[in-house]
C-alpha cells in the first residue's frame, strides 16, 4: 500500500514551488485574484480502503489576504482554481 508521504513535485499549479524533499511548498503568486490559486497534490492518493489517515500542515506565513484552503480533491480537479469552485 503506497500512502502519501510528500507533495508531488510535478502535480501542482504554476504558482507553487515544491522543494526537493517534497515536504515544503511555497506560494509564488501575487494572490490578487482567484486565478492565482495554488494547488498541490500528494505523491500518492489515500487508498479508499484506508479507514483513517492523519496529516499535518504548518502555515509559516498566511499571506497578505490570509486566504488558505486545505483539503482533498480528485485527480481530475483543475490545479489553477480553488477546489470546489
Image (cartoon, grey):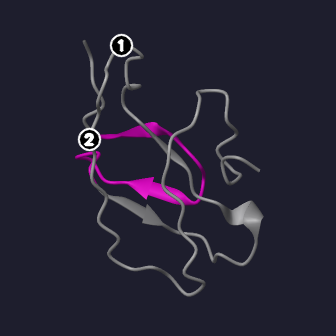
Q: Position of residue 64 (x, y in %)?
A: 55, 87
Residue range highlighted in magenta: 6-23
Crowd class of label 2 (few under 14; some 14 to 19; many from 20; radius 10 Å): few
Residue position marked by numbered label 2 in the rendering: 54
Query: Contact, CB < 8 Å: mark 2 with mark 1?
Result: no
Residue 66 located left or right of residue 50: right
Q: Position of residue 50 (x, y in %)?
A: 31, 20
SS for tag 1?
loop
SS for tag 2?
loop
Label 2 and label 1: CA atoms lie apart by 14 Å
* Residue 57 part of the magenta segment: no
Tally of marks: 2
Give the numbered dot on residue 84.
none
Picture quadrant where residue 79 is located: top right
Split into 4 quadrants, where in the image is the N terminus? top left
Residue position marked by numbered label 1 in the rendering: 49
Picture quadrant where residue 3 is located: top left
Residue found 51% across the figure and 40% down from its top = 72
Q: Residue furthest front?
A: 51
- Compared to residue 14, the image places residue 29 above or below, namely below
In the image, 70 versus 14, the foreground residue is 70
* Residue 18 part of the magenta segment: yes
- Compared to residue 61, the image places residue 44 above or below, namely above
Residue found 50% across the figure and 48% down from its top = 71
Residue 19 located left or right of residue 66: left
Picture quadrant where residue 9 is located: top left
Amino acid at each position: 500500500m503506497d500512502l502519501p508521504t510528500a507533495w508531488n513535485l510535478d502535480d501542482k499549479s504554476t504558482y507553487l514551488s515544491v522543494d526537493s524533499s517534497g515536504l515544503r511548498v511555497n506560494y509564488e503568486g501575487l494572490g490578487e485574484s482567484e486565478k492565482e490559486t495554488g494547488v498541490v497534490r500528494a505523491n500518492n492518493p489515500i487508498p479508499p480502503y484506508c479507514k483513517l489517515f492523519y496529516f499535518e500542515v504548518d502555515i509559516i506565513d498566511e499571506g497578505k489576504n490570509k486566504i488558505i484552503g486545505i483539503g482533498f480533491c480528485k485527480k481530475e480537479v483543475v490545479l489553477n482554481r480553488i477546489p470546489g469552485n
